[in-house]
Image (cartoon, grey):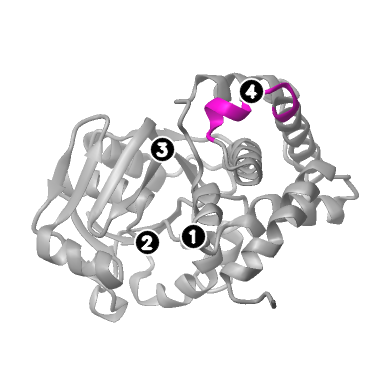
Amino acid sequence: MRIAVMGSGGVGGYFGGRLAMAGHDVCFIARGEHLRAIRQNGLQVESINGDFVVFPAEAKDDLENVGTVELAIVSVKTWQLAEAAQQMRPLVGPETIVLPLLNGVEAADELAKALPPAQIIGGLCRIIAYVEAPGRIRHSGMEPSLVFGELDSRLSERVKTLKDALGRAGIQAEIASDVRAALWRKFMLISTWGGIGAITHAPIGVWRNITGTRAMAEASLRETLAVAREHGVALSGELVADSMTFFDELPPDGTTSMQRDIQEGRPSELESQSGAVVRLGSEAGVPTPTHSFFYYGLIPRERMARSEGSI
């Protein structure tokens, strides 16, 4: 299978690397020092499931020279998605599957503004991974898996074919019967974990064991659940308790990409996480005081990271 990975960071680098090691023809889209390191030394992945190196690795920053692909994995940051979607047009033909693996619940809709909607499916990943150094991905926690499906909930041949290809590459993959509900379930988790982690500057093993921040997490989860329901997404009320159990089982040093970006002064996914809960809640008439606290407490740092603030 000819595959392009749009955004070869922790997520794209790991899953694209596994597919390349399984014999698929993978092109990693990257830039800067990361691109140069992949070209020179291959893509190096340090994983709790075993290290590996994709060498030689095809890596490019000019999408015009990649050609049409069968699978385009989109794993850029959410704030980069609108530009990435425009750049991806040369990759997408009538048989291409566009698989977004981003945080949040609006990636497919954003991609459809620039790409043929019929080529886009819904998707999400579960993994703790990041770029440790140029050309080197670190998978530090969580059993990696993908969940995806047609946005209209059909069980199509193309998603069954994709599941088979991922399975042969040793990647846990699940076809969701309702991928939008699956996206919101993850959104509940990541927006809560990212918001509390960024506000407290603490790993999950610290804030989940403090009464006040634990209560804040539960309130955050309930808010997102209420917003989802008002937007027509069928989610069980048991998800709040299930999500807290999930948090309790994570490695204690775990952090989210949004938390790390904010702490290190980089642009983050704040707008598509707590910002999205606040915005979508306002549209639906659902109060979101906890996410409003996260969002408005963090937006000054976000503006400074994007050089939009003033001193």
Residue bearing mark 2: 7
Tell which circle, 2 or 4, labels the residue nearer the N-terminal end.
Answer: 2
Q: Residue 121's x, y, as percent?
A: 49, 52
Q: Earlier in the sequence, mark 2 or mark 3?
A: 2
Magenta stretch: includes residue 205: yes
The residue wearing badge 4 is 244
Are discs 2 and 1 less than 8 Å apart at CB? Answer: yes
Q: Residues within 10 Å of mark 1 (few under 14, many from 20)?
A: some
x and y, in percent, of residue 67 in the image: 26, 74
Q: Amino acid at mark 4?
A: Met
Please identify, in this view, whether the residue under mark 2 or under mark 4 is nearer the observer.
4
Along the viewing direction, whichever of 48 and 229 lies nearer the viewer: 48
For the N terminus, which image quadrant?
bottom left
The residue located at (18%, 49%) in the rendering is: 44
Q: Residues within 10 Å of mark 2 (few under 14, many from 20)?
A: many
Tell me where residue 248 sits by quadrant: top right
Provide the residue designation for mark 1: 77
Quote the CA–CA distance across marks 2 and 3: 15 Å
Instruction: Name the amino acid type tagged 2.
Output: Gly
Q: Are marks 4 and 3 in contact (CB under 8 Å)?
A: no
Tell me the distance, in whole angstroms, between the alpha carbons under discs 1 and 3: 15 Å
What amino acid type should be assigned to the residue bearing mark 1?
Answer: Lys
Residue tagged by mark 3? 127
Q: Residue at x 82, y 50 (%)?
A: 281
Query: In the image, what residue type sits under mark 3?
Result: Ile
- Judged left or right of residue 135, residue 193 is right
The vertical placement of 200 against 86, above or below, is: above
Sooner in the amino-acid sequence: mark 1 or mark 3:
1
Residue 181 falls within the magenta-colored stretch:
no
* Kind of element beneath mark 3: strand
Q: Residue at x 68, y 25 (%)?
A: 239
